[in-house]
Amino acid sequence: MEKKLLIGKIPLYKGMIFLFVFAILFFISPDSYTHEIYGRTDSAIFFMSGKALMNGMTPYVDYSDSKGLLLWVIYGIGYLLSPTNYHGVFWISVILWFSIFYFCYKILRLYFNDKEAIFGTFLMSIPFFIHLFYYETRAECFCTLPVVQGIYATQLFLRSNNETKLLKNVYALGVGTMCCFLIKWSISVMMLSFIFSILLFCSERKVWIKIFITFLCGLITSSIPFLVYFLQTNNLNNFLIEYIVGTGKTVSSDLNMFISDYISSCIELFTTRRFVYVLYIIAAAYICLSLKKKEYLANVLCAMAFVFMSIVHDLGYYLYIASSFGIFFVIVVVKFAERKCIKTEMNFVLIFLCFIVCTLGHFKRLQLMGYKNYRYIYNDKKVKESYENADIEMLKVKSPKVLCLNCGEKGIGMKANTLPACKYWTYQIGMTKEMQDNAIKCLKERKADFVICMAESERDNELVKNNGYQFVTRLIDCTNVRNIYKRNNIE
């Protein structure tokens, strides 16, 4: 039996993984202490939604943004931990990514000995944290844990004879699929590829039935707390209409346009940096061919499902959810490396190299992109001062309600505990006429204490001023300038 190194009672690899994850996230995560709170996109909307939830507002009635309740619960907890910045979310991310890397280790352990598994685990930092794909905390990041667990459950089915362990992880797969549904429902559809692949290659009828029932139990039991919440608040119908139907409308297009866009996206898979995701599929196929077992086609099917489904309407980061399948590329790399006999010392060298690759890439990206996405603490005083001026104005009102008219939520007034003024308080891609009308109605009824709009839009600025708002300050963010208006005669 292989002897494991311990730090006290903690296995050495767990301590190494935690420190490694913390160190990398500390430098590259936009939620970390090394970054300012300014210049965000998705994460600012998620934080505002979580804050609204924790302040008693009703999701899908008082506010909405095409995402699931669980994501807002996560950000709500982050808000409770640290109300005026993203540091609470950062610590949640540290726990999340430690768990993800831990599952990567468990997957690799089914293929290799302890030293080689640790070696491969640290290699996974490249597909997860390389600056080309990871540059802001998005919904896909929080769905990565269920995806990695799904890969682990599939490998248990392929490589382990422990039925009890398999069923426990199939149950967890059901829970993870429901979690994805309650974060970003399109990813939960991709998650079904795991259970489909397992059942497809399961030859024993009794085991097949057990796996299917166990998966359903995981789905159902994990949905109960949310179902109870929606029933108690009489909000289930709003959730289904807004989250499922409403989100579908924001990405809908006619069939010809959809086919044309999809073909273009498929071509880009082979002609752009997205080709790395094709390499993950090829690696899974290589493993299947080298082992000469048709059951390993399950890995290929799952990888293809995630890659070719996530490129639909891809905005440049949807494919990130398929990063977990980089584990198959890592398996191939470690398989070649083990011939050179991986030594313990090599892991420490690898940790250092991965850290350098992941962090330096982000530093270079910041330098090239200017104001894009986020700022380090010591950068861009002009942007910082404009946000602080906005905070000063908004702090004069207790928990002010904010409307971002035809522009995205950017976390403006975070220190003032701002809240959404209406359901569609922020612009979202694919916004329907109903959503736009809701924002205009909010403006005309003067529900918002502050209205934010693009400085370059004469129409929006005139509309705001004509409805009883006065200009108070200007906000500089990235390459955009926003005007902030305050409601006349506000108390």
Image (cartoon, grey):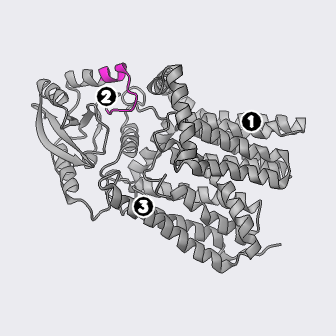
Distance from disc 2 to disc 1, alpha carbons, whole Å, reads 41 Å
Compared with 437, 414 (above or below) is below
Q: Is residue 15 left or right of residue 194?
A: left
Q: Position of residue 454 (x, y in %)?
A: 22, 37
Residues rendered magenta in the picture: 426-438
- Asked if the magenta segment contains residue 415, the reply would be no
Label 1 or label 3, whichever comes before in sequence order: 1
Q: Which residue is mark 3?
A: 362
Comparing marks 1 and 3, which lies closer to the viewer? Answer: 3
Q: Which residue is mark 1?
A: 196
**Residue 228: x and y, percent?**
55, 30
Give whichever of 95, 283 is nearer the camera.
Answer: 283
| Most foreground residue, 457 or 62 | 457
Residue indicated by mark 2: 422
Whether residue 276 sits left or right of residue 91 in the image: it is right
Asked if residue 417 can be seen in this view, the reply is: yes
- Kind of residue at disc 1: Phe
Q: Is residue 26 visible?
A: no
